[in-house]
Each structure stands twice: as C-alpha cells, then as structure tokens.
Amino acid sequence: MNATTAGATAPDQGRIVLLTTSHRVAPGLLSWPAWQALRTADRVLCADAAHPQLPYLREAGIRVDEAAPTAQELVAACAGGRTAVVVATGEGDPALTDGLARLAGTGRVAMPDLELLPASYDLPGARLLDLVQVMDRIRLECPWSSQRTHKGLAKYAIEEAYELVEAIEDGDRDELREELGDVLLQVVFHARIAEDDPDAPFSVDDVAGTIVDKLVHRHPHVFGDESADTPEEVREHWLRTKAVEKQRTSVTEGVPLGQPGLALAAKLHSRVRTADLDVPLPSGEGVGYQLLALAARAESEGTDPEAALRAAARAYRDAIRAVEG
C-alpha cells in the first residue's frame, strides 16, 4: 500500500514496513521478503521487549530498538529516503496504523511509502495450538477444571456427541461448527488431564500421533503401494489391516456394550456379517427380540437403525407440536 497519495508526495520520504508475525509459528521462521526487509532497513523497531521474534532477530545480527514511536516520529525517522521496519506485536499495531492514517489525512505531511508485510503465516490447524494453550491455562488456574478426572468428564463426552449428531441431522451449519468444537474440547480436556497422571502420562501430541500413525497404516492405498478404486476396496483394506492390528479372538471384542441398544444390535450384526459367520438371531418373545431383528435387518440393508428411529421420533415430535397448536 502506498500512502504518499494521501498526503504530499516526496521521493525522499522513505518507507515504513509494518512486519506482522503469527505467534502460532515457531519464532525465527520468517519469510524471505521479511528477512530482506529486516536486513536492508535503516532502523528496526519493536515496542514489545518480550516479543518472541527478538532473540532470533538479534542472533541473526539484526539490531532492534525497543521503542514505540508515534506516527509523527516514525515518519520523521524515514526522512531522507530511509526505511524503518516495525516488528508489530500480535497480528498488527492498530494504534500506529490509525495514527499514520490520520497524519496522511491532513494532507500537510509528506508521507513515506507504507507497506504491510506478513512475515509468517498460520498453517492449517494452527488455531489448535491456541486451544491447547487455553486448555493448559484453564487446567492450572480454574478451580473446577483443575479437579476434573476422566471418569467425571465421561458423561459430557456422551452428551456432546449426541448434540453433534443432532446438529448434523438438523442441517444447521452454525450449530454444527459449535458442536464440533465442543467435541474437540472433550478430546483436548482428557488429553490435558492425562498429562497429570503420575504413572502413565501422555499428551495431546501423543493422542494426535497415535491417530496419525493409525490413519497412515490403514490407508496403504493413499500412503503406500496398494491401490483401491472403490469405497468397497477401501473398506476391505481397512478391515484387513484392523484385524491384523487387533488380533481379536472374537468378533465381539471392542464392541462397547454401553452404547444405545439399536446401535449395539446393529454393530454386533455387522461384525457377524463381515466375518461371514452363520449365527442365527436368538428367538424369544418380547419387544427386545423384535427390535433386535429389526436392527439386524436395517443393518443388512445399509440403514442405521439409530438414525432411522431418531428420524421417526422427530417426525412424531413435530406431529405432537402440530396438535398442541
């Protein structure tokens, strides 16, 4: 951005570079244009003595003045064609930029060129670092959060999962984003609690590393030499790899009995069908056996019985509300 057009134009008024950096990127990992601007500047300034970039800049031989100049002082520092680089705090310096804009707006000051130069950018997933840092502080400083345990939080994980499913079924994008965040919080919270375990601690990085390794291993058609052109072939790869990993002695291993009844029945039937076992459904009187048969039939037809029942229940709810007026 060239600010000389807002005020008087003078070729010897120099250049101001506002250098912005992301705190989510390791200090010192700056772009090549940023390093060029820093090395060729007549003066480099930073108002924050604790700015994470300062030690790395000084180690690289960049002289940085710890100063917070006003807009007028900064313009004066650029007189004679000099270049001043301001290492901004956070993601910018609104007070300084507003001051420069007001100064240029008077039309009475010959303004230097003004350039906003991003020195580093957030990578995808960078805000997850913020979540980890916030969770760490809450765990240390919040009287409630500091006392939570895995068992004490278990019920919230179930509640948040159900709320996420409801948001998906409602098709509400804003609600979906919020509920995904609530589920993510549960993961980060449990991982932070795990760090405090005296016998077998692990961190959120260990959690992420475990799932990354699992995903890579179970997708040889993506990260390895195998090929899969259809969803069915992908599923075969997944099941085959999972079977080798788990080394289960029964198809029922790993099926949580605490899940909703219809989902449990469908999962057991899916395991039996996938393993090509001949296990007839138990016969008996009562609604439980009838529901088991319905769940098995739904699973065989590719229908999630839990989702189907929820959809029917929602229709029933709407009918009730219609009658209520």
Image (cartoon, grey):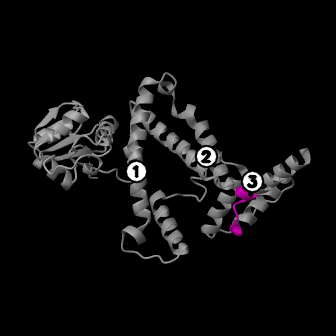
The residue carrying pointer 2 sits among few (fewer than 14), some (14 to 19) or many (20 or more) residues within 10 Å by Cα, namely some
Q: Where does the image place residue 65, in percent across and percent down from the top left?
A: 14, 33
Residue 295: x and y in percent read 74, 60
Examine the structure image and report whether residue 305 is included in the region drawn in magenta. Answer: yes
> Is residue 252 rendered to the left or right of residue 106?
right
Residue 161: mark: 2
Disc nearest the viewer among 1 and 3 = 1
- Kindly tell me whether residue 260 is visible in this rendering: yes
**What mark, if any, has residue 310 been given in the picture?**
3
Report which residue position mark 1 lands on: 125
Q: What residue type is labelled 1?
A: Gly
Q: Callout 3: helix, strand or loop?
A: helix
Label 1 SS: loop
Q: Residue at image x 75%, y 53%? A: 310
Residue at position x 58%, y 58% from top?
250
Residue extending farthest to the left is 61
Q: How far apart are marks 3 and 2 (CA)?
A: 15 Å
